[in-house]
Amino acid sequence: MNSYGDSSSPRGRAQIPGQHGDPGGDARGGGWSAAQEGTAPAGRASVAPRAAGAGRASVGGSASVPQPGAPASGSASAAVPPRGGSAAGSASVGSASVGRAVPGRASVPVSPAPAAGRAAGAGRASVPVSPAAGGSAGRATVGTAAVGAAPAGRASVGSAAVGGVSGRATARASVSPAASGPGGPGGPTGPGRRARGSGDPTGAARAKKRKRMNLLIASFAVFIMLAGLGVVGFTYYSTNVVLPEDTTPPQATTLYAFDNKTIIAKVGTQNRTLVTIDQIPTHVQDAVAAAEDRNFYEHSGVDYKGIVRAAWNNVSGGSKQGASTITQQYARNAFDNLKDDTYARKVKEAILASKLNDEYTKPQIMQHYLNIIYFGRGAHGIEAAAQTYFAKPAKSLSVAEGAVLAALIKQPEAGAGHKGYDPAVNPTEAKSRWEYVISGMVAEGWLNAPGKPAAPTLAEYPTRTLKKPNQAGAGIDYGVNTPYGNVINYVKQEMRDKGICVDKEEQVTDAKPLCSQALMSGGYKIRTTIDTKIQKAAVETAQRSKKGSELSDQPPNLMAAVVAIEPKTGRVLAYYGGDNGTGTDYAGKNTDASGNPYGGHPPGSSFKIYTLAAALKEGKALESRWKGKAFTPKGTKFKVSNAGVDNPECGDSCTLTVSTLKSLNVPFYHVAEQIGPDKVVDMAAKAGVSMMWRSDTNPPKGYDLTKTDPKDIAPNPFFHVVGYGQYPITVLDHANGVATFANQGRYHKAHFLYSVEKRDEVTGKWKKIADEGRLKGEQRIDKDVVADVTSVLEQYPGRVNHKLDDGRKAASKTGTWELKSGSEDNGDAWMIGYTPQIATAVWVGNLKDRKPLKLKNGTRISGGNLPGDIWERFMDEAHKGKDKMDFPPAANVGDPKAGNGEEPPPPPPPSGQPPCDPLGLFCPPGGNNPGGPTNPGGPTNPGGPTNPTDPRPGRDGGGGGLLPSLTPRPDSD
């Protein structure tokens, strides 16, 4: 019997059968190599057999190799001929133990050695097998070997001592022909293959140290793997797993313009819109699989081969690998308790992934994954990513675009040590990752195969369609920090009004969430009434930060607000109340820290349209005459005047037409006093003014006109000065009121919400749950009354030099209010007006502290200059492409003798001209009556807007008179 010594070589290679019976292949994911004492780090030992006979054992199965006198058993077996016989063949050997065999373990006879020896190590060792005399050489490949013991993945090779000690073979062992005798070619002193004999103690010590280190690493890795598998097996059926439908991820609500295509805002805790798998192209799904999990369609949720391969790579000093499948990544992102980076989390992640794989089909898992995974730039899910990076829905993504998004998943944003794969931030590595994805798709047969798309080249990388990162867009607050932000606030309120959401927790149902959370997580698709072309005109005209706007080069304290409404529907076409939705809304209502509403501005003379309509409704005619001279009302301490003009040309015989066109305050005070201020308040409420603030409290107290009887609030606190616009209202309400006049007295409530849709969780289709309803409107003001008001207001654009282009007819009115009592400066300035198609209100005031309104050249701002410039420019732009329309003719309602004024005296004849005869047959053309309806005062009227002697040039005639320090009260008697 021959003996064998140390025949290992430090860096040989053992031949290992590969998968699918390839004898020279590499085993993938088969386990970690455990090197025990008696193995060299990387050697191959050539051992000569006793007799001829070729045999080969390959890793993977369990085989028993008979040994004389020792029974063997195993799950699979292949016989190796005993001594004295000759055979050729191969045997699959899993783990071997000398002298005994259990399932999965096989006995391998080894010839004893006369002296100490080590078999080749580091996962490759030669184990000599004694063939029969005269037989040919045989080779056995063994998984992992240890003396006397065989844990999982290791083969125990029994040792026989003939004057020697045990040797161990590990991982992969090639059985080579053995020479006879210790001095033969395979012996310890023979030529061998770079054998290190007993005469090299230093090499032996180094080899032993390396083997011990490898043993520790491999043992630890095997322990972790076995422990993890044990936990998985133990807890798999006992863990109560919450299924994905019970953990629906938060979805962002998307707001669209009226075209239902342009996204104007997106809000939510996460920017996400759920889609179904049929809305995600197959090539996008394949790109994601190629990037993240190429075995996705084969494994059962956990890729154990990948885990072993990654673990070995990690413990052996390679780059860190996670080996997480798409299913595991989905589980980690979907469940809150899987966020920490611990081994316990990884185990549970594997459990959940396995359960998810049992519960759902692969397409369902891919759908869940692509709806929840993060793509960078604030985009969660494939739909949000497609919109964010390519401004298109996921269903329209090309192969090249889908691969860009798939490449992002590994690291979408910059982190420690890496810039991420956003093409705008790290283009070189982003393209490299993209090529990796494309090549993976080709390798898996998902591209360049029959029935599959062609693979894009690097030249087809979608640079042109790729959007640049935008700080103002695509995140969860997209639109909030733009002028559209205020639109979001109104949409929230309208959703509450329509019952889509509720305010009380006890009222919450699956269909009706809390209003405070509805937009943030409901995933609604909301179509608004905003016309993007008209909105753009409003912003570019009024926003001071826009180069070329009317405010861009004006003093920094100035602020403007613009609201435009479609009269026939009440739809808000444009809304500019500030630069974002988180600051003060200068066009609408706000709420202070105490819950009090604020935001109104004194409308001044622009409010006279409601006073005029109320007077006509009460039987007063446009040609009725009213006192116009300044006076102090009985029982009050303030003086009512006409912007500093105590005695207008019409004196105490001013018609309502003249009083409106000249913005005289005194006549409108008398109107409110005579018909009652409650009638004025009621008319404003009917037109669309929903709230009014009293001005004698700090802060101003608001009154909801939709819920309050006007008789209860006028004349106290809203006194007769309501007739010329002392009390603040919002720009939105004023625009709504003007729209009612433009629509011949038929009221439509101003609104921003056109429709609301919500995605069906089962079908994935969008379902409409609310809309603006049938817009019938309500006839609140008599048509004839409105026709008469309009007949006066359509004369106004020409008087203040703000006619619209191409002779388009429009009605308008200006208004101003003083900075403070007794001041010559203005604090608020307005221009309101309408055509049959669009009604618009423009306000100019202070951005913060109340300061005098002045242009950069020092001119005082009144309704006729800066607000008028904004109104005219905006209306011209908004009407482009619209037909010209006319207003109905005046109806001339009411009694011309119903006023408190005097009949005008006969005018004195002009110097050098004979007086009129009694019949008026010989009067000069046009007459001499300065207050008559055919002569509203002329350009030299000291109360007119063009009067060069007016101390406030450009004023519209006063716009509201003096602000009393206290609300005036009527005389006690």
Image (cartoon, rainbow, N blue to C red):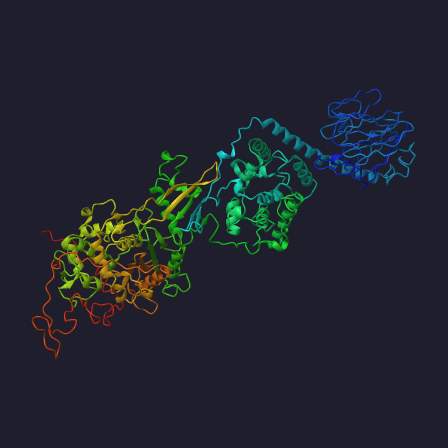
- Residue 861 appears at what percent x and percent y? 30, 65
Residue 397 or residue 410, whichever sits in front? 397
Residue 377 or residue 17, whichever sits in front? 17
Q: Is residue 914 left or right of residue 205?
A: left
Q: Is residue 838 left or right of residue 107?
A: left
- Residue 245 appears at what percent x and percent y? 49, 34
Q: Is residue 725 visible?
A: no
Give the residue furthest to the bottom.
912
Give the residue furthest to the left.
918
Q: Is residue 724 left or right of residue 139?
A: left
Q: Is residue 671 visible?
A: yes
- Residue drawn at 13 percent across, 53 percent down: 970
Q: Quadrant of the N terminus?
A: top right
- Residue 236 appears at what percent x and percent y? 58, 28
Q: Specify the quadrant of the image occupied by residue 211.
A: top right
Position of residue 669 relative to residue 7, above or below, is: below
- Residue 6 appears at what percent x and percent y? 85, 35
